[in-house]
Image (cartoon, rainbow, N blue to C red):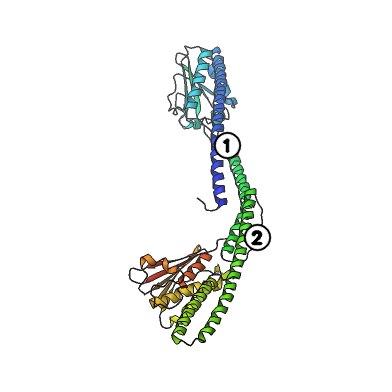
Amino acid sequence: MPRSLLGRMLLLTLLVVLIAQGLSSLIWLAQLRASQVQGLRASANSLAHSMSASVSYFRSLPVAYRPMVLDQLRSMGGTRFFVSLNDKPLDMSVLPVTSRKQAVIEVVSEVLHERLGQGMEISVEFVSPDDLRIFNSGLKLDELPRSWAHYALTLEPLNPPVLVTQIRLDEGEWLYIASLLPEPYTGLEPQGLPRQQIGFIVLTTALLLLFIGLLVHWQSLPLKRLARTAREMSLGADVPPVAEAGGSEVVEVGRAFNAMRERISRYLTERSQLFSAISHDLRTPITRLRLRVELLEDEALQAKFSRDLDELELLVKGALQCVKDTDIHENIEPVDLNQVLEILAEPYLRDGRVTVEGKVLAPYQGKPLALRRCIGNLIDNAIKYGERAHLRIIDGPEAFVLQVDDQGPGVPEQRLEQVFEPHFRLAAQQQGYGLGLGIARNIAHSHGGEVSLLNLREGGLRVTLCLPRLME
């Protein structure tokens, strides 16, 4: 099943058209074959009447004149039948009986018995041209002069079956009549769909698929623009409102997206202003308190106040850094991740603390500084807590994946998610704010990706960064 709306609509349309055209063609073909059978029976009836007239004419001739008349007819050529007189019925290999052959045989036999008499001994059979015998001597059709029978019994290159009728006139005298059915019933076999009908089905299907494809493509363009704008907005880019075009449903979606975009933009602006105000408002009283602490004469009390102020300032700086690192206003542009990885790993390559495996195949559409900070945090954590880091790059058309393996003690299974929380540290003696993994995950989320952890069996921790590529 295709993934795109256009592909699914075209496939569904093609299936519906094929089913509809197939059913209509079957109905039309059934009606066509029924009318062909009726026409075949009418042609067989007309042919049988002509045969009965010829038989009546030969029966009216004196016996001595019959061979002479036959010779004259053969010399003239172009007759509808090939007629001969034999002293016994000719024995030939007959063709297998089908429904249409049986219908012709029944009609011809019925008409001949009705016109010539029910007591007449009549044999009606279909014979292949290759097995056709003409006289008692067993002569084949190809052994006769062309003027005798070829114009009446051959239709090259088809060579249709020949209707052979043998009628007993008198004792030791059999009238032999060989003929072809008239067009379009010469071949007797059921006809399939004509080429014109098949061509019409192909043409109408192609035109319908073309128009459906154009319609779906035209209607899906606003959705594609909406998806691209939503993707860019999720990465933090300043995007203009989407055009409210297309069908009424698409227009409603675009209107709702524009309203959501405006609310999110207003929220981000207010949040930025809020944290700027917090940064300004908190730094001033902290500085003022430090000055007042310096005036205290009690050194023990002064040390306690200083320690509390250091802790307060550390918390403020950590919170502001968390917001600053995850709320980076950058334009989305192609980023050479090979160069980013080379710059970040270069300080550790000389002493072998970082090794790199694989290569990025194509630039990645994202925020350069944010991606550098994200990957840098992962490498720094691996070096800090695992001593060494092995970077494995797995790139493809759909996603960029970076695996960072270290040689540290790993993370307890019950805390694999907890380590992403701000200010969380596994050990109290660990340095830092405990924000690196959280910032890396937030940056990955802003690019539509994810950061996950896995304890390796041989020891160490694997941090996997997966970033989906922007699909146009």
Residue ID for mark 2: 241
Instruction: Answer with the quarter of the image where residue 431 lies.
Output: bottom left
Image coordinates for residue 13, horizontal then vertical, percent: 56, 44
Q: Is residue 203 above or below residue 286?
A: above
Query: Can residue 59 be seen?
Result: yes
Q: How many marks?
A: 2
Q: Position of residue 359 (x, y in %)?
A: 47, 71
- Residue 43's spot in the image, x, y percent? 57, 23
Q: Give the percent coordinates (x, y) of residue 345.
A: 46, 78
Badge nearest the viewer, 2 or 1: 2
The residue lying at 50 percent from left, 62 percent from top is 398
Type of amino acid under label 2: Pro
In the rendering, which numbered label is found on residue 194? 1
Which range of residues does the magenta coloring cover?
A: 184-198
Which tag, 2 or 1, sits closer to the chain's start? 1
Look at label 1 and name its amino acid. Pro
Other-residue count near label 2 (Cα within 10 Å), few / some / many at <14 / 14–19 / ≥20? some
Magenta stretch prevailing secondary structure: loop
